Image: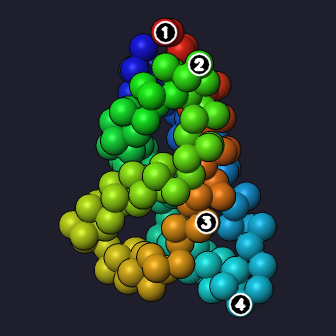
Amino acid sequence: MTLSDILHDSTTQTKVVADCARLIDCQVAAKTGLGGMALKATYGMVKSVGAGYIPSAIGRVLPEVLAALEPMWADGIKTGNPAAYLSQNPDETADVILGVTDRRIASASNGLVKSSYGKLRQSIKSDVEMAVPGLADIFAAYSVVTQ
């Protein structure tokens, strides 16, 4: 089973998206200090685009993220635990995820989202790295790993 296979079932896809949205909400809520305040304010502005904007955005980008992470997931399967493999390689995992979002944002039509992302992009990598274990756990919960 490939990592992208978790999206073939619409019910599972909905659950993955919801779990990812909760993970992002928790990650943002846990931020402290001036950087945390800036991130929370920006995230709040993006969420103000609409109640379903974040889950919708996740749903749009998730297929590309999973496809981009597929080689790492496959390497993790070889080691016996793909979720642990992603978690043990947060720098590389974050680079893959941010590469996808960078490409998506470059072609975004929503100026607020594009501007907000641009302001935070330099500092966001460490936030993505910190979220990798939770994200890997979400993927593992919905995938069937075969060796």
Label 3 to label 1, Cα distance in Å?
31 Å
Residue at left offset 52%, top offset 57%: 91
Q: Is residue 127 left or right of residue 13?
A: right
Give the mark, 4 or 2, whose residue is nearer the N terminus: 4
Residue 131 marker: none
State the SS at label 3. Answer: helix
Horizontal side of residue 110 vs 147, given as left or right = left
State the residue in front, 12 or 81: 81
Mark 1 or 2, nearer chain start: 2
As drawn, the residue found furthest toward the left would be 107
Residue picked out by circle 1: 147
Q: What's the CA distance linking mark 4 and mark 3?
A: 14 Å
- Gap in angstroms between the C-alphas marked 3 and 2: 26 Å
How much space separates mark 1 and mark 2, taking CA atoms?
A: 8 Å
Secondary structure under badge 4?
A: helix
Q: Which residue is mark 3?
A: 127
Q: Position of residue 127 (x, y in %)?
A: 61, 66
Residue 73 image position (x, y, % from top left): 46, 30
Could you classify mark 1 by the number of other residues whose Cα lies within 10 Å: few (under 14), some (14-19), or many (20 or more)? Answer: few
Task: Identify the residue shown where x is 61% and y is 79%.
Answer: 39
Residues marked 1 and 2 touching at CB (< 8 Å) = yes
Residue corresponding to mark 2? 80
* Picture layout, residue 145 above or below residue 101: above
Mark 4 belongs to which amino acid? Leu
Amino acid tagged 3: Asp
Please determine whether, in this image, residue 21 is positioned above or below residue 116: above
- Mark earlier in primary sequence (3, 1): 3
Label at residue 34: 4
Q: Could you tell me residue 115's position as x and y percent? A: 38, 83
